[in-house]
Amino acid sequence: MRIISGLLKGRKIKTVKGMNTRPTSDRVRESLFNILNEKPKGAKVLDLFAGTGALGLEALSRGASDAVFIDYNHQAISVLRQNIHLLGLKDRAKILQWDISKNLKCLKAYPFYFNLVFLDPPYGQALCKPALIHIQRQGSLAHGAVVVIEHEASEVIDYLSEDFFLKDTRIYGRTALSFFSSQ
């Protein structure tokens, strides 16, 4: 895997061995960031179920100011630390090991609001809706923040509340990207 664009374009990033972590393919990542266009510039990014950190690292390469990466898997956290070190992003990236399925109280330590959120949970475990609820309850989103959920194309993401509305869904083979905006 590699960084597709921005200051770190072409730099390789490590992946987690095995099938426990499913990194976003270069093709889907490129499409995602083409859709986002200028959104990453200056953004405070939250990368949930971060895995290797590919989405948040790509956002940092494209001008995001800071990123908080959250995952629970020990192996993924180790690879993510290596990637941040290899790319020289230690001053702009924070890593939290946390079980997102329970809550996001770990975000209380961050006094700012996130403009861009990536949510890429393991497929087939129905974790999207609980994660959106936790984001909503934590109150860590800036007005107009964009939340991008990567999920199986067959999974319908229909979580609606007064805080989020679905703007668009794009399908790439087995993978879908759903774009939400916060109110």
Image (cartoon, helix red, strand yellow):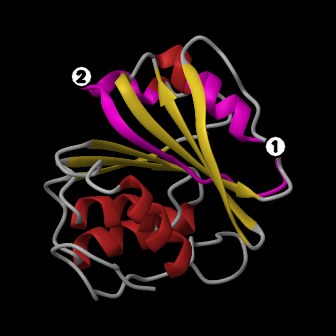
Q: Position of residue 176 (x, y in %)?
A: 69, 59
Q: Position of residue 1 (x, y in %)?
A: 46, 86
Left or right for 120, reference 66:
right
> Which residue is denoted by mark 2 in the rendering?
111
The total of numbered circles placed on residues is 2
Q: Is residue 27 above or below residue 126?
A: below
Asked which quadrant contains residue 45, the reply is top left
* Label placed on residue 156: 1
Circle 1: element type: loop
* Residue 53 in view in this figure: no
Contact check, label 1 and label 2, Cβ < 8 Å: no
Which numbered mark, 1 or 2, is in the foreground of this view? Answer: 1
Which of the two residues, 29 or 120, is positioned nearer the viewer here?
29
Circle 2: element type: loop
Q: Position of residue 59 (x, y in %)?
A: 31, 59
Please name the amino acid that badge 2 sits on: Pro
Which residue is found at the position 34% from the left and 88% from the top? 12
Q: Is residue 8 above or below residue 75?
A: below
Report if residue 129 lies within the magenta region: yes
Which of the two residues, 130 or 32, is positioned nearer the viewer here?
32
Please name the amino acid that badge 1 sits on: Val
Image: magenta residue range: 106-134
Which residue is found at the position 32% from the left and 35% from the top? 115
